[in-house]
Structure formats: structure tokens, C-alpha cells
Image (tube, helix red, strand yellow):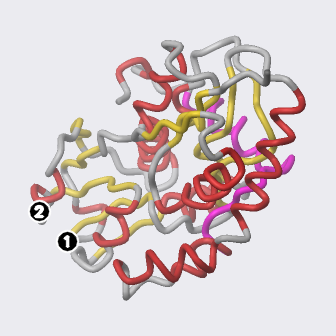
Amino acid sequence: MAERHRLVLVNYLNTLPFLAGLNHAFGKKHDLLLAHPAECAQTLFTGQADIGLIPIGALIDKNGWTRVTDFGIGCDGPVATVCLFGHTPLHEWDHVFLDYQSRTSVLLARILLAEYWNHQPKLIEAFPGFENQISEQTGGLIIGDRAILAREKYRYCYDLGEAWKAMTGLPFVFAVWIAMSHIEPEFEHEMIRAFESGMTSIPDIVSTEGKQYPNFDLVYYYKQNIRYKLDGEALQGMEKFVELARQIPDLGKSS
């Protein structure tokens, strides 16, 4: 009997092609667990899952993991759903709230604020509802589906994928599929087929989800903003991010 696997991933718009493919291919043969990015890593590392779509920030100080498939979540320019928002220009901010859902995006924001925008506001660990605390002198990092709605609320939007590309010339990788123990090749091939199938479901996803975001081009988001297959250049971008993140003095305190 084939081994039963437990897979964990986020339930964001950008992962819906993965979910569609996995649900179609696996049915009830394997278990799919949903969590926000920070929880995905904890779920995998504590043995509650075998395979996970894990943010790069959670892997910086972690050993013993192996990439599973060449799929992940990345971008090669604007990503649209990882942005700094504010009512005033960035250089007028004295404080910045850092989204509580993703260590990777927090680290990326810290790197870009210091090295790309040359601005050092006070950084505040955020909490649910922090978006309502953004003011004239306070910006905020907002990620995921909430960032789409934030585009209509705030006057200024700074896309972190776009800024990373401008600073480094490289793509950015937010998350990769990994395992902490051996995964049989047959199952990895099954995952690849599931993901490839899921990519063909994007028109159906757009038709269903687009009603919630009438002013946002979901087709462009899936086809242009998000990069699902990670090639050598994307992995170079991932290595560059890890290198810069490790230089942050209080890396261990990053949310």
C-alpha cells in the first residue's frame, strides 16, 4: 500500500493552482493542511506534516531539508501581493508595521528599507487589525490577499518584488516545497503532475475568485506576477536573499 502523506501550504490566491491540482490528483489519498506562512513551517518542523510549501525565511537557520519538485512561489519583478502601503511617501514614515503572517516578507522589507530605499524607520511587530493603524507617518507591510484590497485603501504602494528586482537584477523566491525526510521519487513525480494540472485550472480559478476582486487583474497576477517554476536564476535570487538576511544583526528576532 502506498504511503499516505500530509502536505501543508497556505490558502492564498497564489496557492490555489497548487490546491486545485493536489485536490484533483490526490482526492482523499493524502491529507492537505492549510495555514498561514509562519504556521506552515512550524507544522512541518514539528512533524505534523511530511511535505510543505515553506517560506524561505523559515529555512535560513534550518538544516536537514530537501527541495521537492522545482515548483514554488516566486516573482521576477512586481509580485502585487507583498507591498509596503501608506498614506504618504515612504521616506516620510517614522514607523512601519511588519505583517505578522510571514517572516520572509518581513526580512525582505527590512533589507529593502535599509539597502534600497536607504530609510530606517522604527519597525513594529504587527498584530491582527494593524492595517487600521497606518497613518500619515506610519506605513505597513501587508501581504497576501489582503494586499489586493489594500491597493484601493492607501495612496502609496511599494511592491517588494519590484524593488528586489531593481536592487539585485534577480527574481525573488518566497517559498519552496520541501521535506524533512526522504520522499519516494514516485510521489514527487505525482506532485509534479498535480501541479502541472493545477496550472491549467487558472481560468476556472479566475472565474470563481475574480468576483471578490473586481478591480484587480487576476489573469495577469497568475500569468505574470507569480512565478511557479523556479529555474537557476530564481535560485540565485534565493541564495542572495539568504546571504543578505543573515547579515541582519537581530535576525533571530525577526517575526
Q: Provide the secondary structure element on which disc 2 rests.
A: loop
Look at the image and tell me in which quarter the N terminus lies.
top right
> What range is drawn magenta here?
224-245
* 241 w.r.t. 74: above or below: above
Q: Alpha-carbon neighbours of circle 1 within 10 Å: few (<14), some, or many (≥20)? A: some
Secondary structure mostly seen in magenta is helix
How far is the residue under mark 1 from the one under mark 2? Answer: 6 Å
Could you say where residue 3 lies in the image, as x and y percent from the top left? 74, 21
Q: Amino acid at mark 1?
A: His
Viewer-nearest residue: 222 or 245: 222
Q: Residue at x 41, y 17 (%)?
A: 252
Q: Residue at x 65, y 30 (%)?
A: 243
Could you say where residue 200 lies in the image, as x and y percent from the top left? 73, 71
Give residue 177's quadrant in the image: top right
Q: Residue at x 44, y 75 (%)?
A: 209
Give residue 123's quadrant in the image: top left
Q: Provide the secondary structure element on which disc 1 rests.
A: loop
Whether the residues at callouts 1 and 2 have beta carbons within 8 Å, the answer is: yes
Q: Is residue 237 toward the left or the right of residue 61 in the image?
A: right
> Which label belongs to residue 87?
1
Q: Amino acid at mark 2?
A: Ser
> Which label belongs to residue 232?
none
Give the residue at mark 2. Answer: 135
Could you say where residue 187 lies in the image, as x and y percent from the top left? 81, 33
Labels 1 and 2: the sequence-earlier one: 1
